[in-house]
Image (cartoon, rainbow, N blue to C red):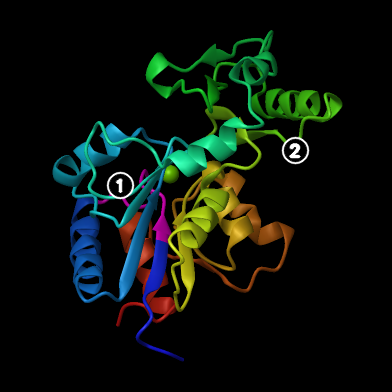
Amino acid sequence: MNNSKPWILASDIDNTLTGDAQALRQLAARLAAKQARGMLFLILATGRRLEQVLNGFDAEGIPEPNAIISQVGTEIYLPPFAPDTAPLPEWDTLLREQFSRNRAVSFLSGIEGLEMQPAEYTTPLKASGYLDKTPSPEAAVSLIRNRILEAKQEDAYQAIWSSGRDLDIIPSAAGKGKAIRYLIQFLTLVSRRVVVAGDSGNDRTMFDEFEHGIVVANAQPELTRLGDETLQPGIYFAKQPYAAGVEEGLRNFGLLP
Ligand SMILES: [Mg+2]
């Protein structure tokens, strides 16, 4: 194996990196040392808005990445990072081609108990609601997915269900996994291996797209079901939660000593 090529770690933030501040401090220091030596290309892939990611560097000890994928994989940002940095225009244009936000909202209409998310999570490429007050969130998710199928729009729209609460309609071409794949090709990154890390349903597309992944011990059932559905030998189910679980997984993959 050529050790001169960097690894790529693409990690979710909330309840994957965050949740145990001390464990995150230790992990962040180890990742920063690898990045400084050109041995690691770190991607943060999150449902957060860009500004919430940037605030987290100081406020929460979130490691400074080489790229940020935000809003559930509908926006990609490259350094230098600032609150007014524009998302990667090539990715933005590609996603807008097939996606109408009004159409996306229509798949959510009339769902009993569904609340739309506040305006800051509303973008031209994402229609998002909360399902935790619906009588049966799972039934609501099925209904929404069936609406997309019945409209024969599954190539343009997908419903991402996460944390027992968040429902996002985003372009089928988007999502964390596809955004990471696009970024790797866009930057023509050559790596030894891509490892993804996550805890909930909106991380699912990363595990679908890449063979090697870390599921932290505190993961939500919608993600741990990964282990039941198919044998995925490349997925490491950590015994520890949060950042300690990510570090345990990276050690398992030989990225950290
Ligand atoms: Mg998370």
Bounds of the magenta segment: 10-20
Under tag 1, what secondary structure?
Answer: loop
Is 250 on the left-hand or right-hand side of 224? left
Q: Mark 2 = which residue?
A: 155
- 163 vs 64: above or below: above
Going by the numbered disc 2, the residue's amino acid type is Asp
Q: Is mark 2 within 8 Å of ligand 1?
A: no
Give the x, y percent position of residue 4: 35, 85
Q: Mark 1 = which residue?
A: 19
Tell me which image quadrant ligand 1 sits in: top left
Instruction: Give the mark, 2 or 1, whose residue is nearer the N terminus.
Output: 1
- 140 vs 89: above or below: above
Foreground label between 2 and 1: 2
Q: Main secondary structure of the magenta part?
A: loop
Q: Say if residue 215 shows up in the picture.
A: no
Is 68 on the left-hand or right-hand side of 253? left
Few, some or many residues within 10 Å of mark 1 (<14, 14–19, 20+): some
Q: Nearer the viewer, residue 217 or 180?
A: 180
Is 146 on the left-hand or right-hand side of 223? right
CA distance separating discs 2 and 1 = 35 Å
Is 168 on the left-hand or right-hand side of 18? right
Q: Say if residue 196 shows up in the picture.
A: yes
Q: Nearer the viewer, residue 92 or 151?
A: 92
